[in-house]
């Protein structure tokens, strides 16, 4: 049962990821990216990380992708035909190199020693809001506070950059 | 039970997809989406390790990565809007002011 769910979610995630970078229309890319994020949230659920799965849907699919679609709408790209380009040797070279790196990664992943897998009940305890929150507010309190600083800097930066005129 | 290696391979394939997108796509917005794809694949491998090792630290890291991704998306898209206002394009080959 777990395996079927995993293979379906993983397959859809990979295929939608490939569709993201091959579509010509940025809106289609954004929609496939949203599908990819939902599949990833499902994969997180199979790993018993409930909190992160919900955050994934709320923050990524909900907030960040709305921002993307909004910007695509705002830009009003007239000359999409100019953005597309056909076959080129640069692309083939890039694909070949990326495939080589992928093979190396898979080789490294497969040759590693077996990680002792724990029983699922413990994983269920790890992924809850309670356990993540305890780690976040005790051991990682300082990075958590720095995160708020990062967000305020990002807000100020985005407002300043998107303003009509800098003065 | 699915093994840890399966999750890591899915993560690796998604990461490489993002890399190929960054290298080959000439539309700035799609390049941006590829970066999100790479960040998400790293998140997946962190969650997989966290679940299989029974340690919540990985999930805290994913939380931070999501914060950074949100900040990066906001600032990056603002840059794209400013660039479009100046050059009327998001084609990366035409944005070559820093190239000599």
Image: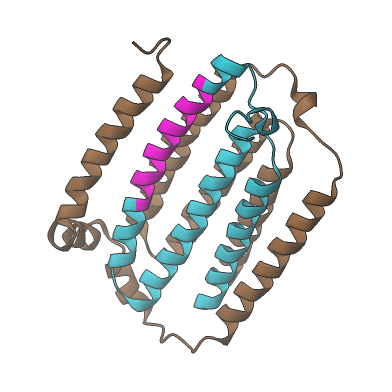
Chain colours: A brown, B cyan
Residue A108 part of the magenta segment: no
**At which x and y percent is residue B42?**
47, 60
Residue B31 lies in quadrant: top right
Q: How many marks?
A: 0
Say if residue A46 shows up in the picture.
yes
Query: Looking at the picture, does residue A137 appear above or below residue B67?
Result: below
**At which x and y percent is residue A135?**
19, 62
- Identified at 54% across, 77% down, the residue is B5
- Identified at 72% across, 63% down, the residue is A97
Residue B72 part of the magenta segment: yes
Towards the viewer: A31 or B63: B63
- Name the dominant secondary structure of the magenta segment: helix
Q: In this view, does B66 lie to the left or right of A76?
A: left
Query: Looking at the picture, does residue A118 appear above or below residue B61?
Result: below
**At which x and y percent is residue B64?**
32, 52
- Identified at 55% across, 63% down, the residue is B11
Residue A155 lies in quadrant: top left
**At which x and y percent is residue B26?**
69, 37
Location of the C terminus of chain A (image quadrant): top left
The stretch in magenta equals: B65-82
Query: Looking at the picture, does residue B64 appear above or below residue A122?
Result: above
Location of the N terminus of chain A (image quadrant): bottom right
Q: Is residue A119 left or right of residue A37?
A: left
Which residue is situated farthest in the right direction here? Answer: A87
Q: Is residue A154 left or right of residue B28?
A: left
- Identified at 47% across, 33% down, the residue is B76
Query: Looking at the picture, does residue A56 appear above or below residue B26?
Result: below
Which residue is situated farthest in the bottom direction here? Answer: A113
Towards the viewer: B10 or B71: B71
């Amino acid at each position: 049962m777990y395996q079927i769910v995993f293979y379906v979610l993983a397959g859809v995630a990979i295929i939608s990821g490939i569709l993201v970078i091959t579509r010509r229309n940025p809106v289609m890319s954004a929609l496939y990216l949203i599908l990819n994020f939902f599949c990833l949230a499902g994969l997180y659920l199979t790993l018993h990380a409930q909190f992160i799965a919900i955050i994934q849907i709320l923050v990524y699919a909900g907030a960040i992708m709305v921002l993307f679609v909004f910007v695509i709408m705002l830009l009003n790209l007239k000359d999409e035909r100019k953005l597309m380009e056909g076959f080129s040797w640069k692309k083939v070279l890039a694909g070949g190199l990326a495939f080589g790196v992928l093979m190396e990664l898979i080789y490294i992943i497969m040759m590693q020693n077996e990680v002792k897998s724990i029983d699922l009940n413990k994983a269920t305890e790890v992924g809850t809001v309670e356990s993540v929150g305890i780690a976040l507010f005790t051991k990682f309190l300082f990075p958590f506070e720095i995160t708020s600083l990062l967000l305020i800097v990002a807000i100020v930066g985005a407002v300043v950059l998107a303003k009509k005129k800098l003065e | 039970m699915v093994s840890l290696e399966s999750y890591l391979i899915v993560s690796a394939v998604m990461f490489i997809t993002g890399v190929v997108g960054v290298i080959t796509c000439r539309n700035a917005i799609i390049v941006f989406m590829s970066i999100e794809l790479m960040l998400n694949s790293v998140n997946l491998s962190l969650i997989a390790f966290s679940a299989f090792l029974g340690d919540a630290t990985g999930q805290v890291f994913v939380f931070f990565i999501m914060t950074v991704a949100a900040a990066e998306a906001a600032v990056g898209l603002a840059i794209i809007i400013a660039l479009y206002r100046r050059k009327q394009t998001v084609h990366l080959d035409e944005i070559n002011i820093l190239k000599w």
